[in-house]
Amino acid sequence: MQVSITGRHVELTDPLKAYVDDKLQHLKHSFDYIVDVHVVLSVEKNRQRCEVNMQANGVNIHASHETDDMYASIDGVMDKVSRQLKRYRAKLRKHLSQHGQRKGREIKVSHRVIELGQGSDELPETQAPNILHHESIHAQTMSVDEAVMQMELAENKTILMFTNADTDTLNALYRRSDGSLNWVEPEAS
């Protein structure tokens, strides 16, 4: 498990780092597949906030907690992460007992952020759009239930591309502005 701790407007003292590390080790004992953890401790006026971003077995987990005491914030966020991991583990156990091993394949998907022309709704035919950001991701094989669980666990994720384990097709799950989830699946022809 790789751990990184960042402090924003707070001095990262050795006792504070040791406290965070001790709490993370308790999580490690309850769930073996934690790969990467990033903890951000921040202070704004009287609000002391702890955020945790964790990658565990292909699932991204995000949680935050805010109080007037940093140690209480760390305890609160670790409780939230622990509950999310337990819920994930229970769903994974249920899914694997129902479906056995996963079938299917991962598909590589490109994601591009395109800048539209300033002040106009359409681009001239001769002008190609500017690509602001390009990212390649692997659409992991999972069931729709697992995809929904990943979206619930990652509060900041807006879209998830995955290979549907039941149909072996590329699917998308995205979060609407009202917070509900939409599932896009190709129709069989």
Image (cartoon, grey):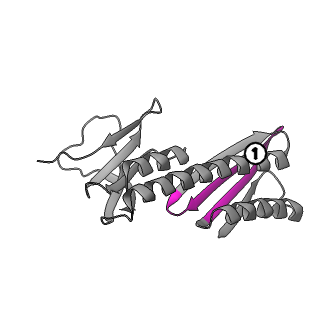
**Of 188 and 175, which appears nearest the observer?**
188
Q: Main secondary structure of the magenta part?
A: strand
Q: Which residue lies furthest to the front in this view?
A: 97
**Of 40 and 151, which appears nearest the observer?**
151
**What is the x, y in percent for residue 144?**
37, 48
**Residue at the location (49% across, 62% down)?**
58
> In the image, is residue 49 above or below residue 33?
above
* Left-right relation of 149 to 119: right
Let me know if residue 160 appears in the view: yes
On the image, which quarter does residue 117 sit in?
Answer: top left
Q: What residue type is labelled 1?
A: Gly
* Left-right relation of 3 to 13: left
Q: Which residue lies furthest to the bottom in this view?
A: 1
Location of the N terminus by quadrant is: bottom right
> In the image, is residue 134 above or below residue 113?
below
User: Which segment is the magenta one?
Assistant: 36-59
**What is the x, y in percent for residue 77?**
72, 48
Q: What element carries label 1?
A: helix
**What is the x, y in percent for residue 82?**
67, 52
**Residue at the location (58% across, 49% down)?**
87
- Residue, disc 1: 76
Q: Residue furthest left?
A: 189
**Residue at the location (33% across, 65% down)?**
106
> In the image, is residue 139 above or below residue 43?
below
